[in-house]
Amino acid sequence: MEPTVRHRPERSRYELVLDGEIVGVADYYEQEGALVFPHTEIELPLRGGGLGDRLVRGALDDVRTRGRKIVPRCWFVAEFVELNPEYGDLVSR
């Protein structure tokens, strides 16, 4: 089964779900109209397989559809945006 990203606004996070289990999270909070991403995490045994990229891509695609901006405080989100410049317009200046 392919992993999916779901938005859980009541928990202020995006979750990566694989085979019905949450295997990753991207936490956020709102500040000055932007979503600040301070932390992302993939379950330790699953790291290094590209799941972090799937999680962040899914979260940022959702942020884009909602017309929001981000502040990438998490190093992984910041690096993802740097390596994928098509997401650069989402960064709040």
Image (spheres, grey):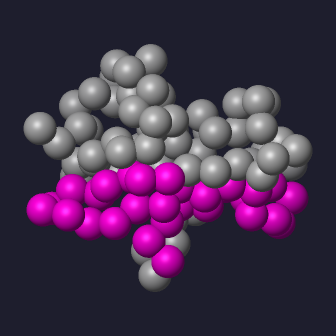
**For this rendering, which residue is in front, 34 or 87?**
34
Q: 26 left or right of 19?
A: left
| Residue 18 painted magenta | yes
Residue 46 rendering spot, x and y as whole percentages: 83, 42
Image quadrant where residue 74 sits:
top left
| Residue 37 painted magenta | yes
Residue 80 rendering spot, x and y as whole percentages: 47, 28
Q: In the picture shown, does residue 21 fall above or below 38?
A: below
Residue 4 seen from this side: no
Q: 91 left or right of 33?
A: right
Q: In the picture shown, does residue 12 fall above or below 62?
A: below
Q: Which residues are magenta?
A: 11-39
Residue 40 seen from this side: yes
Q: Which residue is depicted at the point 26% across and 66% down?
A: 30
Q: In the picture shown, does residue 24 fall above or below 46?
A: below
**For this rendering, which residue is in front, 10 or 93?**
93
What residue occupies the far bottom of the structure in this picture?
A: 10
Q: Quadrant of the C terminus?
A: top left
Q: Which residue is depicted at the point 88% across and 44% down?
A: 45
Q: Which residue is depicted at the point 46% across and 81% down?
A: 10
Picture mark count: 0
Residue 44 rendering spot, x and y as whole percentages: 81, 47
Which secondary structure class fits the magenta region best?
strand
Q: Which residue is depicted at the point 31% across and 55% down?
A: 36
Residue 5 rendering spot, x and y as whole percentages: 61, 54
Q: 91 left or right of 25?
A: left
Q: 43 left or right of 88?
A: right
